[in-house]
Amino acid sequence: MAYSERVSNLYKEQLKGIQEAGIFKQERFIHSPQAADIEVEYPAGASLKKVINMCSNNYLGLSSHPDVLKAAHEGLDARGYGMSSVRFICGTQDIHRELERNVTAFLGTEDTLLFPSCMDANAGVFEAILTKEDVMISDRLVHASLIDGIRLCSAIHDTYKHSDMGHLEEKLQLHSDKRLKIVITDGVFSMDGDTAKLDLMVSLCEKYDAMLLVDESHASGFIGKTGRGTHERCGVVGKIDIITTTFGKALGGASGGCVSGRKELVEMCRQKARPYLFSNTIAPVVVAGVLKVLEILAASTERRDKLEKNAAYWRKGLTEAGFVLKEGDTPIVPVMLFNAKLAQDLSKALYDEGIYAIGFFFPVVPQGQARIRTQISAGHEIHHLDKALSAFIKVGKKFNILGKTKQEIVEMYGL
Ligand SMILES: *Cc1c(COP(=O)(O)O)cnc(C)c1O
């Protein structure tokens, strides 16, 4: 058999395995801007269907906001399309630095460095500031991009049980001999929608001389009284050594990320972080858009307030209907189904009712924890939520899971 054929067969076999495990990811093509109402082609080749989007990270509904579009158009005209260079050669414009200053002010930190994405920020930050004499202690449920950044760094790695402060303290004691210690967490955890206990974590880090890094991708723009993030909610603004976050979710939803925090740490990233040094940064048109987003957020808390109301309304509706939810108070509202196939079947049935919400199952969430993760947006109006709720209730009845406990659902459908 020719080499190329052997290679093809090898991967065909692996792809078949993925398909048979029922975890093959199928793209759905959206033919409209990102918003509460979208037009979707699914499966490929099917005619377009208008559905309500319940699974985007467009928390503030700014992805297609007219003021953001206008600012982006103006940015495109004023600063061009591309930089054709990395930052430190000839890829930095005045607006990149302006955005860094404005993000610093928004997050309440000392300085900020832009990255092509938050994935890149997380990939670069640890290697830039730590050596093998140091230790990284991470929550067991941190985002995949933090795990990759940890892998790229020579420092020792240890973990603590999810949000377990007693266990974190044990690990801080265990590693008291290391040169530097850094504790690593998400601010809001994306799969469960729960929030890190940053007030307690700051105290522990002070007690044991450790740094704290918080990934605020699912928090920046809407968590806390003025939407600064989890540190605002927990009353520890100015006390987080490093915040990483994305502009690809609530803050306009296009792309880009950053490392923000103590100025010497940020400067170390500017000198050494490889995704910053060796990859083009955010395009001028996107920089102009994010600048406008920050201006909108500084002018009013209207959008995050509406999001909070919408999320409470949605959570209450699903609870009263008798669904099993993950507890929490963020716009991430997971409807627990436990069984992977049930999650997929429910998602399909919802789509037929005009509701777009995706099933998540192992390995994205732990085995036996399959769910439909709904995400609420300030772009939703009450009529969207009411329509989605009716569809959930109709489908919930069809699958006979309303008012059922976890145990009863598992008995019916298995794990
Ligand atoms: C989405 C996400 C990222 C990646 O953000 P990008 O800017 O799209 O790379 C990183 N961390 C967390 C916690 C996220 O949810």
Image (cartoon, grey):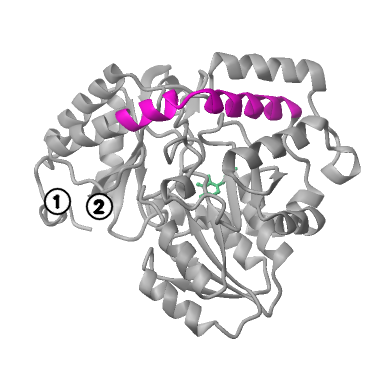
Q: In which quarter of the image is residue 154?
A: bottom right
Q: Main secondary structure of the magenta part?
A: helix
Answer yes or no: is residue 237 visible: yes
Q: Identify the residue shown where x is 21% and y is 31%.
A: 392
List x then y, in percent, for residue 268.
76, 59
**Residue 297 among those drawn in magenta:** yes
Q: Which amino acid does label 2 sit on?
A: Asn
In magenta, the rendered stretch is: 284-309
According to the picture, the residue beneath numbered tag 2 turns out to be: 339
Which one is in front, 226 or 58? Answer: 226
Element on which disc 1 rests: helix
Q: Identify the residue shown where x is 33% and y is 19%.
A: 381
- Would you place residue 333 above or below residue 153 in this image? above
Which one is in front, 91 or 297? Answer: 297
Q: Do the residues labelled 1 and 2 touch (CB within 8 Å)?
A: yes
> How many discs appear?
2
List x then y, in percent, for residue 372.
31, 42
According to the picture, the residue beneath numbered tag 1 turns out to be: 409
